[in-house]
Image: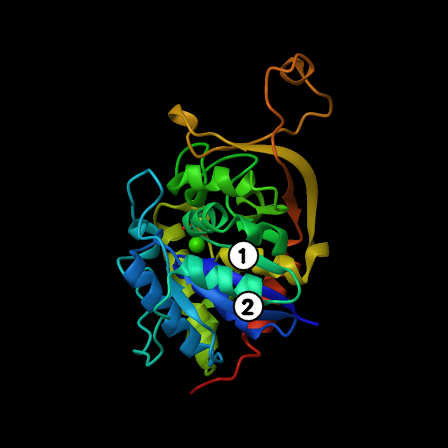
Amino acid sequence: MPTPVILDVDTGVDDALAILFAVAHPDLDVLGITCVAGNASLEQVVDNTLRVLDAAAAGDIPVAAGAHRPLIAPARSASHVHGADGLGGLVLPATRRTARPEHAVELLRRLIMDRAEPVTLVALAPQTNLALLLRTHPEVAGRIERIVVMGGSASVGNATAVAEFNVWHDPEAAAIVFDAGVPVYMYGLDVFNRVSVAADRAHALERGDHSVGRIVGELLGSRIALSEDEHAEYTGLIGDAGAVCSIVEPAALRTERRPVRVELAGLGRGQTLVDRREFAGEDVVHGLVDPWPVVEVALDVDADRVARLFLDTVLALPSGA
Ligand code: BDR
Ligand code: CA
């Protein structure tokens, strides 16, 4: 039976790739998509999400708008990475789809509580909506299979020297989610930065005769253009899509269960501190720290396998032209 998932997105070049993959893969049942401000404004994120669903010829997947800014921090855009419209300059046709009138938190609650089996949440954006959900409707926690988080890092950051964008954008929200007692799988920058499509393949897709392939090629191309400029880390990354791939092909990743804490203060704000020690240190032995939530952290990935899975899956979507 397909895994029931709800995506929380800030579409976003790589969120768009993730939506295409999730809709296309037969082992996933996308119950709904909730939107949050992050890579672009909330309104832009909703519009992009609806247009991407059209491009995938998706069924009637409910979409709802959520938080337009982080819990405490001010909203900041990522237009230098995703472009002014969030899709790196890709222009998708206008859509007749509309967002549901209910707030994302209410759509999440309803979809989770109405489902007989536990639901997997896939957080591909700042975790504001999910934190609001867990605080407003704590009863959902026991009905969530796990939260797959694209966020954090056990090594370097991208938004700051140590903080990954999604966690950095709303660190308080991430701290609430990591600490909610729901199993968390962290697909952080350690693996996110590794799964990419080669430039020649991306450009060939862009020029090809498959409508979804052209979109995928153009989205990847916007990343490649950045990497040719100044952001070396943005080669044809599939980004958020890799987190969704990890649900259907978990064996392509190596994970470790590690204590993780979200840093909220000072220059380290937004960093995910991952305790990778083999033996407890003085802080633990002397009871100086409260126990940190234990998270399944992805630390290594068979990047070629995941990139192949991604391309094979999205290119199986029907071509609209
Ligand atoms: C994350 O931030 C956004 O730019 C991407 O969509 C991804 O979710 C990477 O740090
Ligand atoms: Ca994202």
- Residue on which disc 1 sits: 122
- Residue on which disc 2 sits: 22
In terms of sequence position, does the residue under pointer 2 or pointer 1 come before the other?
A: 2
Three-letter code for the amino acid on which mark 2 is drawn = Ala
- Residue 158 position (above or below residue 54): above
Q: Report the number of numbered marks.
A: 2
- State the residue in front, 169 or 192: 169
Q: Is residue 238 left or right of 257 when viewed as pictured? A: left
- State the residue in front, 176 or 195: 176
| Percent of width and height locating residue 202 | 47, 67
Check mark 2 vs ligand 2: CB closer than 8 Å? yes or no: no
- Residue 4 position (above or below residue 269): below
Characterize the local packing of mark 1: few (<14), some (14-19) or many (20 or more) Cα atoms within 10 angstroms.
Answer: many
State yes or no: discs 2 and 1 in contact (Cβ < 8 Å): yes
The residue that appears at 60% across and 58% down in the rendered structure is 120
Residue sitting at the far left: 84
| The C terminus - image quarter | bottom left
| Percent of width and height locating residue 149 | 54, 49
| Percent of width and height locating residue 77 | 29, 49
Secondary structure, mark 1, is strand
Which one is closest to the eye, mark 2 or mark 1? Answer: 1
Q: Is residue 287 left or right of 234 when viewed as pictured? A: right
- State the residue in front, 214 or 55: 55
Can residue 238 be seen by looking at this rendering? no
The residue that appears at 36% across and 71% down in the rendered structure is 99
The residue that appears at 60% across and 23% down in the rendered structure is 290
| The N terminus - image quarter | bottom right
Residue sitting at the far bottom: 321
Three-letter code for the amino acid on which mark 1 is drawn = Val
| Percent of width and height locating residue 246 | 63, 57
- Residue 294 position (above or below residue 229): above
